[in-house]
């Protein structure tokens, strides 16, 4: 850009000696062009060097000068379009397809695994799983931000990576995996790098609690032929897992339900200046048009999305717990009473 601006100013100088022969003009123009190219190459070299010394991928300008300007995109959307230059491969024919960054912010047993398989069924979405379940990656703010840099630069590889032709790249992040702890730095990172947040919560925290208890039991009992599965792909497996009926500790029940609701409200408020959408698992199950909303939010070409996962706890809650009467009595007259009888 600098080089071009320089040339247009120099033409003023060229115009002055009007009677000079054509050859002289040509020489001057050529000289200016060579200088322009030289200045350009120096600038590129310097920005590469800067890149290396800071060792952060994402601080570079998101606008790629080698890609044509996208027309028809609102000004306010430009900060969400990125042209990553992965260190590990080239994006080939999709190098000029803009990529959007997202993060699914959720809690364990809230349907985020299922939701992620749906998103990954899109040919242009790479959602790389629960990357911060590995403690070392969230040991401090720098490891957290470095990990995100890699993901958003498309240098993170999982079975979900679609690499060159990803139009949206992200991962899922549980609130208790360093997200709440480092919320200020993470929100700042999201805002600076144009990352959109997708909150996924459950309206019914009671059913979620039963899923947490059952999943925790199965991690030791390993009901499926000695293997522990948090998500299943067949009705038979779902039935075997649902056979286990946990006893819900009622003494702390109300307090824990309040805590879960407070945590989700807090998370949403921490990211209130970040572009975001709030989804509820129950709504996604009931109403598949919610998946249209998600695709619109990520500005993806619309696709019908499918998941092979099968829900484990279906039907009335009373079938899934050992101490139903006790739970009923505990929640009688509280704001959680309505969750006893909802079917998701
Ligand atoms: C989406 O799901 C369908 C049905 O399970 C499958 O045939 C298709 O390959 C999936 N597409 C992607 C990109 O995973
Ligand atoms: C963050 O953690 C990593 C790995 O655990 C460590 O190497 C690094 O020195 C830590 N950085 C800071 C600023 O504490
Ligand atoms: C989606 O992926 C296909 C190849 O799988 C590619 O041709 C297309 O350009 C991509 N679309 C977007 C919006 O990136
Ligand atoms: C457990 O293993 C047996 C024998 O390999 C097989 O027939 C059965 O389907 C398996 N059950 C599940 C739930 O995977
Ligand atoms: C965003 O949330 C913070 C608390 O985290 C609050 O102080 C602030 O008023 C909120 N801003 C808006 C615009 O809702
Ligand atoms: C709920 O409490 C009311 C009184 O507050 C009582 O009449 C009713 O039987 C209770 N229901 C259950 C299911 O315990």
Image (spheres, helix red, strand yellow):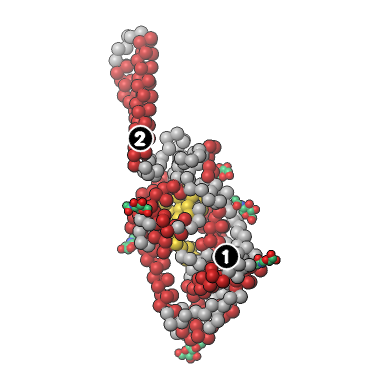
Q: Which x, y percent locates residue 310?
A: 61, 65
Q: Which residue appears at 53% of the width and 50% of the height?
A: 158
Mark 1 falls on what kind of element?
loop
Q: Which x, y percent locates residue 269?
A: 36, 63
Mark earlier in primary sequence (2, 1): 2
Residue 65 vertical position relative to residue 21 in the rendered view, above or below: below
Q: Which residue appears at 54% of the width and 55% of the height?
A: 119
Q: Can you tell which mark lies on residue 49?
A: 2
Residue 45 vertical position relative to residue 320 in the rendered view, above or below: above
Which quadrant of the figure contains the N terminus?
top left
Residue 254 vertical position relative to residue 98 in the rendered view, above or below: below
Which quadrant of the figure contains the C terminus?
bottom right
Q: Is disc 2 in contact with disc 1, using a CB cutoff of under 8 Å?
A: no
Q: Which x, y percent locates residue 43?
A: 35, 31
Mark 2 falls on what kind of element?
helix
Q: Can you tell which mark lies on residue 229?
A: 1
């Amino acid at each position: 850009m600098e080089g071009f601006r320089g040339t247009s100013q120099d033409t003023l100088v060229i115009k002055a000696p009007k009677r000079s022969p054509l050859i002289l003009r040509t020489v001057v123009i050529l000289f200016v062009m060579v200088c322009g190219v030289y200045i350009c190459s120096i600038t590129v070299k310097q920005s590469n060097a800067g890149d290396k010394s800071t060792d952060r991928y994402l601080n570079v300008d998101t606008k790629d000068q080698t890609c044509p300007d996208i027309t028809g995109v609102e000004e306010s959307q430009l900060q969400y379009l990125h042209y990553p230059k992965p260190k590990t491969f080239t994006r080939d024919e999709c190098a000029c397809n803009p990529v959007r960054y997202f993060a699914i912010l959720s809690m364990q047993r809230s349907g985020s695994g299922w939701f992620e398989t749906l998103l990954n069924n899109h040919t242009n979405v790479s959602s790389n799983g629960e990357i911060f379940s590995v403690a070392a990656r969230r040991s401090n703010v720098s490891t957290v931000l470095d990990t995100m840099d890699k993901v958003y630069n498309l240098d993170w590889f999982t079975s979900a990576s679609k690499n060159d032709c990803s139009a949206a790249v992200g991962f899922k992040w549980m609130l208790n995996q360093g997200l709440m702890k480092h919320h200020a730095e993470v929100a700042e990172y999201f805002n600076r790098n144009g990352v959109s947040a997708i909150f996924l919560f459950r309206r019914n925290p009671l059913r979620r609690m039963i899923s947490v208890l059952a999943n925790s039991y199965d991690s030791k009992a390993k009901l499926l032929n000695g293997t522990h599965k948090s998500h299943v792909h067949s009705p038979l497996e779902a039935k075997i897992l649902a056979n286990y009926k946990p006893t819900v500790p009622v003494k702390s029940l109300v307090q824990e339900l309040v805590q879960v609701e407070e945590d989700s409200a807090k998370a949403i408020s921490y990211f209130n200046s970040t572009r975001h959408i709030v989804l509820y698992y129950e709504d996604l199950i009931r109403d598949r048009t919610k998946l249209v909303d998600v695709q619109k939010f990520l500005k993806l070409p619309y696709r019908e999305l499918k998941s092979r996962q099968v829900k484990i706890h279906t039907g009335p809650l009373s079938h899934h717990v050992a101490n139903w009467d006790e739970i009923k009595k505990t929640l009688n007259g509280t704001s959680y009473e309505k969750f006893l009888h909802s079917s998701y």
